[in-house]
Amino acid sequence: MSTTDLRPGTTATAAPRRRSTAAAVAALAQRHGALVVLALLLAYGGIAYDTFLTGYNLGNVAVQASFLAVIALGMTLVIVSGGIDLSVGSVYALSGVLAAYGSRWGVLGALLLPLAVALAIGLVQGLLIGRWGMAPFIVTLGGLLFARGLLQFLTDEGSQTFLVPAGSAFRWLGQGAVLGIGVPVWVVLVLFLLGGLLLQRTAFGMRLFAIGGSEDAASLMGLPVARTKVVTYALSGGLAGLAGALNAAQLGSGVTVIGVGLELNAIAAVVIGGTLLTGGQGAVSGTLAGVALLYAIQELINQSGSVNSNMQAVVSGAVLIVVVVTQTVLSRVRRR
């Protein structure tokens, strides 16, 4: 036996090192697990199906995923702060109708009208939650019902469809491409870059983490908890409104039946991306990977052709359950 093995404290220091290593591995898996699974799915899809990894197919999937990605970005901010926003699906649908209606006044009308309404809905919800201390679940559920009801009122219960004029420049925002990549995808990339900087490099982002970690502690530290929540929900509403406007530009009309359950998909993407539902931890890069993972699963189901498309919900639900269980286990490992 060497003298190195007999040094005092060797056994005592080895255990903390092992725990530290396990915690670091758990943190890494929690942050980047979705990206690893996505890479495996893409590799499998490329091997199994000839058209899966073609530029045309990936471009179409990316454009379709961009609308959920914009909504999920706002949801990330909300969940990091310890809240939830159930209204985004209905705000998304309402904004699409308002964008199509406003397109008669050009691109500015098509964008400003839905964004103003969506921001107003988010702002009111933020005031009720941040200033009045009401439960986010109840407030945003009310926002869901309000936005969907307003949508039904404006479209005469869905019987009236507003069309974007054929020659409108607004259509380019949903149907155009730059360097072979759809405009909505470029919008997503810019927004996620800004969202990452906001969350990780600004005082506002640090406040979100602090509030999500412990609202009471954040208040004792003198942080503007109420104001931060108001801004967060307004941002979530505004991003849902932008996503609805982009969707209307792509479809060329305001579709009244979209957005049902979309808030659940957004929450699923955020959680799959490593953001804790309890708040205080998360990253927009993980959310983007979570959105891509959901759409990769959908595309694999579509490519197979032999599986009912309704299985997408089953598979997505199973993935979400596995991710939540895994996050719980990894969180316990990190706390030890």
Image (cartoon, rainbow, N blue to C red):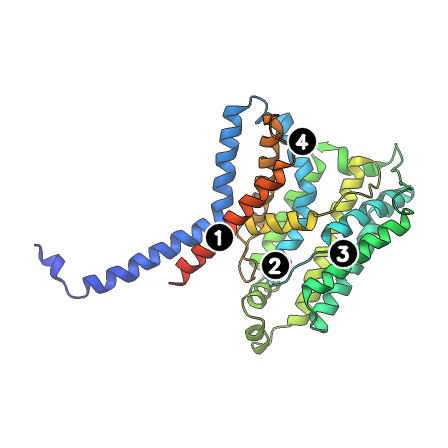
- Dot placed on the residue nearer the N-terminal end, 1 or 4: 4
Disc 3 to disc 2, C-alpha distance: 17 Å
Pointer 1: what residue?
A: 325
Residue positioned 66% across, 39% down in the render: 65
State how far apart marks 2 and 1 are (Cα): 18 Å
What is the C-alpha distance between the residues marked 3 and 1? 28 Å
Horizontal and vertical percent position of residue 180: 67, 29
Q: Which mark is residue 144?
A: 3
When the figure is inspected, residue 138 is found, relative to residue 222, above or below; the finding is: above
Asked if the residue at tag 4 contacts the one at tag 3, i.e. Cβ–Cβ closer than 8 Å, the answer is no
Q: Which amino acid lies under the numbered mark 2 shown in the image of this protein? A: Ile
Q: CA distance from mark 3 to mark 4?
A: 29 Å
- Amino acid type, mark 4: Asn
User: Of label 3 and label 4, which has the lower sequence position?
Assistant: 4
Q: Amino acid at mark 3?
A: Leu
* Up/down of 321 relative to 223, above or below: above
Q: Nearer the viewer, mark 2 or mark 1?
A: 1
Instruction: Give the residue drawn at x 79%, y 59%.
Output: 121
- Disc 3 or disc 4, which is closer to the eye? 3
- Estimate the x, y position of residue 33 in percent, counting from the top left: 48, 46
The residue tagged 4 is 60
